[in-house]
Amino acid sequence: MINPNDRLLVISTSTIHGFSFLEYIKDEIKEFIQSDEIIFVPYARPSGISYDDYTQNVKDALQTVGISVKGLHTFENKKEAILHAKAIFIGGGNTFLLLKTLYELGLIEELRSVVHNGTPYIGTSAGSNLTGLTIGTTNDMPIVYPPSFDALQFLPFNINPHYLDPDPNSTHKGETRETRINEFHKFNHQVVVGLREGSWLRVENGVVELKGKLSARIFRQNEQPIEFESGILEEKVYRI
Amino acid sequence: MINPNDRLLVISTSTIHGFSFLEYIKDEIKEFIQSDEIIFVPYARPSGISYDDYTQNVKDALQTVGISVKGLHTFENKKEAILHAKAIFIGGGNTFLLLKTLYELGLIEELRSVVHNGTPYIGTSAGSNLTGLTIGTTNDMPIVYPPSFDALQFLPFNINPHYLDPDPNSTHKGETRETRINEFHKFNHQVVVGLREGSWLRVENGVVELKGKLSARIFRQNEQPIEFESGILEEKVYRI
């Protein structure tokens, strides 16, 4: 069951084709957080960008909707910063690096605690992977070794962000995304929600709603995948 | 330095477009092993295929060149089987699952030992990832949690099999392969050899030779990638 206090925006991607960073989603973020400041968690470091530069990009994108942004890395006492945050935004990049860093800083329990007390949580890409049970359905390269693949576990299923349909014209013999998720289901029971770029889940009052332009692809173990168009995702679909 | 006794075929993919399983590479395998039997290691289980079925596919493919195949899973004493193998072939599938299984069965040191004593080793895809220092440049989903990312470490660099060039027409915002390898190099020093489908490395007498149809893309930390066409890969290129 999803904690009814949890408020989550689980976003497939920070950027969609033809739009600048966060442009398509910033109004939703503004309305969702119901305040004017967030703590940004830059630890996933896409392309190895520095914490400062990554945070600056978020500042630049969100100042246009009147949100002020502080990087978690700038706080000496990070647990205190999370405790007092009005909203938390964990950005995309490398999921292994992100999770390892959060474990090393001892912030996993703190994040769970404040979200269960109602602090709004926004995740994009790797930050969305963390809302699920494990990072076992990330698309990222295992560039570092985290002490566990267990994620923040706000949702009783897994997320696959940047979900990508097979290219019918491809001659490449590497596995398709669907094949990979099917392999995951040989060894794991939980449902996997494949979120296409431009889609996101909004979670409030224990209810999961699919928003955005595209349907989501839902993978249940030993069943055919389901295309879910939009709206409320019923519990029977994502529970095992 | 590569152990001069090591004999390796490090193959990007078992199957290339337009050919059946192992068809394009089976003559090279036959000539390489200099015998008529191999032990096949089916633990990577592509698409979750059973050990028996996977081994049968290899049997069917290699009987046409007069090689008999036994699955390692059929031996009660697997360490003995490896010790007495005339050649070892580790097939592709999921690299995390493969490595975890080898650690759990306690076969890592046994494999290193026999290869350093001259037993020919053939790897495809996940089996090729294992010849490098770590599995940190696999393309696979982390469907299970291995006790370490350290691989068999026959080569003093990492392999990225199924290397895929960026698609200039793509509107997808997930990371390209090159971006992922660049992220790897923010946290790891070793060279990464991107092997395109249809190419392989043949390693003998401490010498690494690139064979097959396509160039390899070689990534060195903090340097521009190099396109290596074919032939002997000089040590200065892959050593750090």
Image (cartoon, coloured by chain):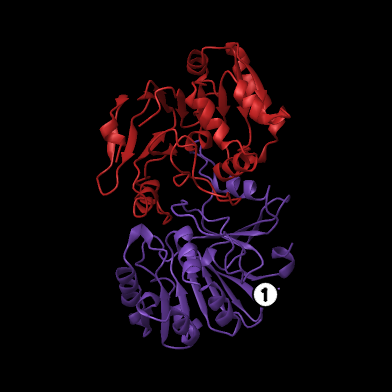
Chain colours: A purple, B red
The answer to which quarter of the image holds residue B110 is top right
Is A69 situated above or below A57? Answer: below
Crowding at label 1, few (<14), some or many (≥20) Cα neighbours within 10 Å?
some
Residue shown at 28% from the left, 42% from the top: B225
x 59%, y 85%: residue: A117
Q: How far across and down, in percent of the image, does residue A128 sit?
A: 52, 66
Q: Is residue B168 visible?
A: yes
Whole-percent x, y for residue B227 in the image: 28, 35
Q: From the viewer's perspective, is B214 left or right of B111?
A: left
Q: Determine if residue A171 is in view.
A: no
Q: Nearer the viewer, residue A30 or B119?
A: B119
Q: Mark 1 sits on what residue? A: A2
Q: Secondary structure at mark 1?
A: loop
Q: Residue at x 56, y 51 (%)?
A: B142
| Residue drawn where x is 47% and y is 29% of the image | B11
Measuring from the top left, give residue B68's x and y in whole percent: 64, 16
- The amino acid sitting under disc 1 is Ile
Q: Quadrant of residue A116?
A: bottom right
Chain bearing mark 1: A
